[in-house]
Image (cartoon, rainbow, N blue to C red):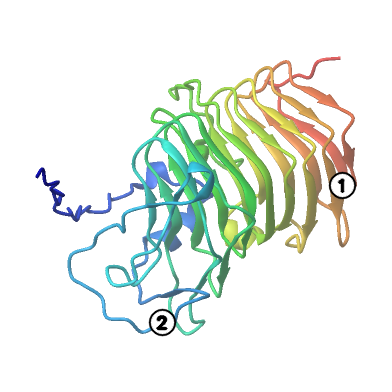
Amino acid sequence: MNSKHAIGVAAILLITVMPRVSADEIGGGQLVWLLLSEGIKQQFRPRSVTSGQDTQSAPRVAPAQKGSNECEVLQWDRKAFRKPSLAIFRPGKYCLDQDYEFNCSIFDHGCGGKMIEIRASNVDLDFRGHTLRLSGTRGYGGVWGLGQNIRIHNGRIEGAGAGITLMNRGSSPQNGYPSRPLNTEDVFTDTGFVVERMEFSDVLFAVMVAGSGNRIRDNVIDATLDAKASSGPPVALLSYGPSARIERNTLRLHDLTPGSNGYAIYLRSADGTVAEGNTVRVDDTPTGTIGVGLSNSKGVSLRRNRFDTEKSTELDGSSSMQQ
């Protein structure tokens, strides 16, 4: 009589050391980077679990789990990390299955880091309607990515210093910031980033991308134009590099620091970029607000946008728009 045998396979726990991040890789203004550099005690908790769990000395990333629709669910390993650690290091489709909240006490000196880190190309991150919520700090970011063909969609980010920052090696959104001198050594690869159907609430910078051929569309952005917090002219949406399309976004600006300028959209080295169908509204006085700022950008097309700002556009001497 024949018998059948089941062969067991040993489970392997992968130990991963989180990579260090340099100042050149972080976008969002000089002060935001200084906040990112400060190490302090932090508290981070998913809404469905309680805080106060013991941590381990050797950090590790919890293995992603298969969810429905063939995506891998990102999960925070509370036993390994006392602060946010939702990381992606390989191509694939990923998603969230819950909201996450990070609170930094006002009695602390500051908080730094990001909730989700991506270090891979060909990544699709679906929030599935969930929220990354931050309070008490501007030094923490929502999503930070390094690679190509990264798509982030269908979710919310609240209270972040920088909501979403995406780049590839060779260029950083930090170099496209209004107060920085023009950098002629940056190389713009075909990054093909997509940020769509995201909502940003009470952020300093909603989206910052560097590279060529990026798409930012159908987002709702509520931005605080605090020049002191950003250590320079505040920007809600920054695109650094050529051939971007910025379409059908709705931006609401408020709390501009008196006596300063603030941009809804800022484009640098953005030859051939199209900004179409965007709406910008200012809650308080429009004085100092600018719809689109252009720096070293030629042949930019602005079509059917609605700007409730003091100036619709601001161009430097090396920029031009298509007629």
Asked whether, in this view, residue 226 is left or right of residue 247, the answer is left
Q: Amino acid at mark 1?
A: Thr
Q: Amino acid at mark 2?
A: Ser
State the residue position of label 1.
309
The secondary element bearing badge 1 is classed as loop
**What is the crowding at mark 2: few (fewer than 14 residues within 10 Å), some, or many (at least 20)?**
few
In the picture provided, is 251 more to the left or to the right than 12?
right
Residue with the most extreme front position? 1
Q: Quadrant of the C terminus?
A: top right
Residue 176 appears in the picture as rendered: no
**Residue picked out by circle 2:** 51
Rendered position, 202 above or below 268: below
Q: Is residue 205 left or right of residue 33?
A: right
Residue at 38 percent across and 47 percent down: it is 23
Instruction: Estimate how packed mark 1 is, as few (under 14), some (14 to 19) or many (20 or more) residues with alpha carbons within 10 Å.
Output: many
Q: Residue 52 location, x and y as percent? A: 36, 84
Task: State the residue at coordinates (84%, 33%).
Answer: 277
Label 2 sits on a secondary structure element that is loop
Q: Quadrant of residue 51?
A: bottom left
**Could you say where residue 37 lies in the image, as x and y percent from the top left?**
37, 60
Is 241 above or below relative to 112? above
Q: Which is more toward the observer, 111 or 109?
A: 111
Q: Position of residue 236 (x, y in %)?
A: 68, 48
Please name which of the two marks, 1 or 2, marks the residue nearer to the observer: 2
Instruction: Write down the quadrant of residue 224 in the picture.
Output: bottom right
Q: State the residue at coordinates (25%, 59%).
A: 60
Considering depth in this image, is 219 or 8 the residue closer to the camera?
Answer: 8
Residue 46 vertical placement versus 296 (above, below): below
Along the polypeptide, which appears first: circle 1 or circle 2? 2
Q: Is residue 6 left or right of residue 213?
A: left
